[in-house]
Amino acid sequence: MDIKEELEELKKKVSVEIDKSSSVDLIENIRVHLLGKKGDLTKILKGLKDLDPREKPVVGQMANKIRTQLETMISQKKHILEENKLDAQLASEKIDVTLPGETFQIGTKHVLQQIQDQIEDHFLSQGYQVMYGREIETDEYNFERMNLPKDHPARDMQDTFYLTPNVLLRTQTSAMQARAMDKHDFSTGPLKMISPGKVYRRDNDDATHSHQFHQIEGLVVGKKITLADLKGTLQALTDELFGKGHAMRFRQSYFPFTEPSLEVDISWNTVDKNTASQDIEWIEVLGAGMVHPNVLKMANIDPEEYSGFAFGLGPDRFAMIKYGIDDIRNFYLDDLRFLKQFCQVGE
Amino acid sequence: MKVSVNWIKEYMPDFPVNDQVDAQKVADRLALTSTEVAENGYQIPQSSNLVVGKVLEIRTIENSSHLKIAIVNAGKKDYQIVTGAPNIEKNQLVVLALPGALLPNGKKIEATTLDGEISQGMLVSLQEIGFDDSIAPKKHEAGIYVFPKDNDVKVGDDAVKALGIDDLMIDTELTANRGDMLSIRGNLYEFSALLEKEFKLPSLDLQESSKLSKSQISVNVDPKLADRYYLRIINNVKVEESPLWLQRRLWNSGLRPINNLVDVTNYVMLLFGQPMHAFDLNKLEHKNIRVALSKDEKFKTLDGKTHQLKDGEDIVVYDDEEPQMLAGVMGGTKSEVTEKTRDVVLESAVFNPILVRKTARRFNLHSQASQRFERGIDISNCKNALNFAAALLQEVAGGEIAKGIIAGLDDQSSDKKIKISLSDINNYLGTDVKLAEVENIWQRLNFEYDLSGEEFVVSIPKRRPDITIKADLIEEFVRIYGYEKVPARLPQTVNKQSGLTVDEKLDRAIKNVLLGLGLNQAISYSLTDTEAAGTFTLGKGDEVSLSHPMSQEHSVMRQSILSTLLQAASYNAVREADDIRLFESGTVFFKQNGVQLPKEDHQVAGLISGVPNSNWQHNQKKYDFYYIKGILESFLSSLALKSIISYQASDQHKEMHPGRTADVYVGDHYLGFVGQINPKISKKYKMNSVFVFQIDSDLVHELYKMNQDYTPLDKFPGTERDLSLLVDKKIESAEIERVIKANAGNYLRKLQVIDLYQGKELGEDKKSISYRLDFVNTQATITDAQVNQSIKRIEGELTKQLSIMVR
């Protein structure tokens, strides 16, 4: 056999071996036997020196080609075998992915805070400012400036915790109205504010009464502010809180600090033009009205030139309606089983 | 007020209510335009098989101690009824419940045998057919109901109709401004405006006798105490049971018929909204009526209670110097009318509403009369109501009306006039209503007006004292016009740049970071008990307490968030919560001497207790001091405060564990504390180990760094070295860190504790503590020589200053 034949023979033999090899170790073995210092190909190539100088380059080229081919075959096969080995290992590493993960606890924002934040954001986007007021107020700001002089029968509606004859726990966030009007510079434009916070009433705590609850007051005072503006503002608010498609209606009411005074109902169900009136389930959500001229006058604002609207809503009541919460005390007992139900994301 | 549909129909024949569905429609309308309606329906349940019967004959039953047989005719048929009624008499008209009748108490009437005698039904009392004890006439208390002599019923009539209890009631819940709707008359005006129906108010002719009123009594009224005061005298009345028609009106309206005299005063009050009082003339010894302020004296009211009056507080009607009535609230026993009264003084007055309200509250005597006086009465109808009452009394009780009305006060001022233009209305409401629409509504409201151009001058009738200014009149217009017709739009204002202020953003950030650190937001009661209120305080100050708390539990304003947050945690602990993580951001209150309003400070507190977040991969480790400190450290570092935060051991908080509490400082400012609650305290709250922090959030706002600093990133690699030190147990890490930092040179970038070990082999009073030091040179790669030099210096100083051995 001449060298060419030997090379062809080797190529044939090794190709079969590579094909048959079934592990990374075997293929490595083939490589060493073929290409190592004492390898078969090396041995054959050693015979090159005895060849005719004319034949040398031809055979040399051929030998290099076969060497390259076999090397490629080996590395390809090795890659496949390595992949297979890894696959087998991965298959053996299977774990129970249904076991619980290592969780990181995230606290839950209080449901009243969620509603407050949502309402704040809604009004901030419309150019309102948020003003936080005092919880302990004077009789003057809580009542008298709200057109509720001492001995006004409507004071019965709000039984009050007094500290002294003239200092009390505010019964309504309306107490912030007069403070806001006193502070505002009307030459810079209208006053538009909301004021959220805790309020207090002399009530025995039960499922529907609480001596402490929350309110959010809204107040707009400017030139040419109308009842229609109030209606649009509240419709936008209820759309934000309950979603679109809920009807809203005004009912005549009485608050000493607004004239006209209104209770605002929204429909619990979504309604359209075809909904029959008896199928609308109304729920009372807030109180509102046009700012009483006396309230403006007491803030040194001329009611002939300026007008305004105000509204007050209870986040507690909102949450009770929205989630069907049956006991107002839940908001203040801080039972974790209660708190953790109200995930704030996605609301 | 319970408004009787039949009574309304008496004066407004077209009132469109014939059944409960109609009544609901009217109620819904009222609720939108006028006032809330509590409910509507029948005052008394509508039972069937109740008929008017006449007792023809009464027979005793042998061997029966109290039962008798009554033969009762019910029109077509006679029935044999066995009854125990002690008040039964021959010829009485009674209510017979026939077999098949189902009484409101659930009793079903059937033919039965009692003491061996057949009974074909039952004779009943008003209570048995559903009358409340408070409205059933007392006359028949001991037995069955007997129709009065003066009646309009026939034997065999349906008794429900005969008693008039088939009358629908619309029960309005009036707001404080609508005192006018506390009368049938006021409701007629209201319904007329809403439904556009005509009505005619009743009137009676007054026939006076020749006997003069003036010669029988004199009057003197302090004009500060009343706007109107009239008296009339009716001589020789016969006080007895009222006619049935009058009784029906009263019991349907929720009032108990008493006798014709009292009933007339109540009837006129319901009809006109004018409270009325009757005195027995012959019991007024001095015949000298005076309306004046009270003196220090005792007074016994009609309900039998004696009240101590004080000088100058209440309006009192005196006979000379003897008190006869707490004006507008309740009469006294002294001149009370009884069955024996012959000569009556009827009083119709309008007392000062504020004083009446105070009196009613002071003595907790809220009567039908005081309720009306407080809300305002139509002063223009005061005299008319008295004349009507006198005429009606004469009609039902006979007697002669003495000549002349006695007026203590009789000021006839004209109606208030309010100027209002069409544009006033449209500018206020955002509407585009037309002149004719406005005119139509003034007409519906029965308000007289003059119109010139587009300007009205509207006369406000005295029955509506709530309308005093233009805005009131606009409200009257729009409620009748319909709120649903007012357009909806957003205010057309130029919006200024708005958004949360820096402080508001920081407040939200504080909450969000704590939420992210796994604490749940709590909101607890600000009012707490005296024992808890002053605990865990950050500053000193006197407590703010209620003058009249409702309960001890909620009597004082909290002075720390932890005082109430601990109560919340305890609430969870007793409900077997095993992982309690809470925070609250809120207000605390301190009295300020010499300042009217207390100080309102803001604090944030966090609390953890129990076992964190158990997982199958590792054993549960209980919360400890370092867990809460870690939360606080992460929290504070996220806020970027202006100065360095430091922690100093403190045993000065009496509610905290003396060895596991640190005061927290930002620079030199005291921010708050962190640590374990003293187990003596937590045990009281039924908890074991409770770890808390509480900081002054006003100070956080003050020290908040608005502008962040930037440091260029390191360009050269750094080197880290670990130092293991054997130290005396008493030496705090902060002390060692201070020495390390002071001697590390300029290249120390970071210093952290990586290990702490305490074991017997180290010795009882020793601990091993390891630190990792990161060195970086911002100008070039740091060399070993530079680091070694620093380490050598640190080690030297640690040994020298703190006798620390480097291991």
Image: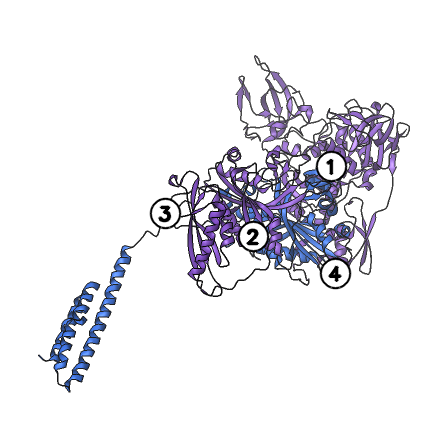
Indicate the colour of chain B: purple
Residue toward you, B242 or B41: B41
What is the chain identity of the residue bearing mark 3?
Answer: B
Q: Give the number of the mark in front: 1 or 4.
A: 4
Residue depth check, mark 4 versus mark 3: number of the one nearer the observer: 3
Q: Are marks 4 and 3 on the same chain?
A: no
* Same chain check for tags 3 and 1: yes
Indicate which disc, 3 or 1, sits on the residue closer to the N terminus: 1
Quadrant in the picture for the N terminus of chain B? top right
Secondary element under disc 4, as helix, strand or loop, is helix
Residue carrying label 1? B371
**Which sits earlier in the primary sequence, circle 2 or circle 1?**
1
> Which hue belongs to chain A?
blue
Q: Say if residue B477 shows up in the picture.
A: no
Q: Secondary structure at mark 1?
A: helix
Question: Which disc is residue B644 wearing?
Answer: 2
Residue position for label 3: B617
Label 4 vs label 2, nearer the camera: 2
Report the amino acid beneath label 2. Ile
Q: Nearer the viewer, mark 3 or mark 2?
A: 2
Q: Label 3 is placed on what type of residue?
A: Gln
What is the number of the mark on residue A187?
4
* Residue B298 position within the rendered picture, expressed as x and y whole percent measured from the top left: 78, 24
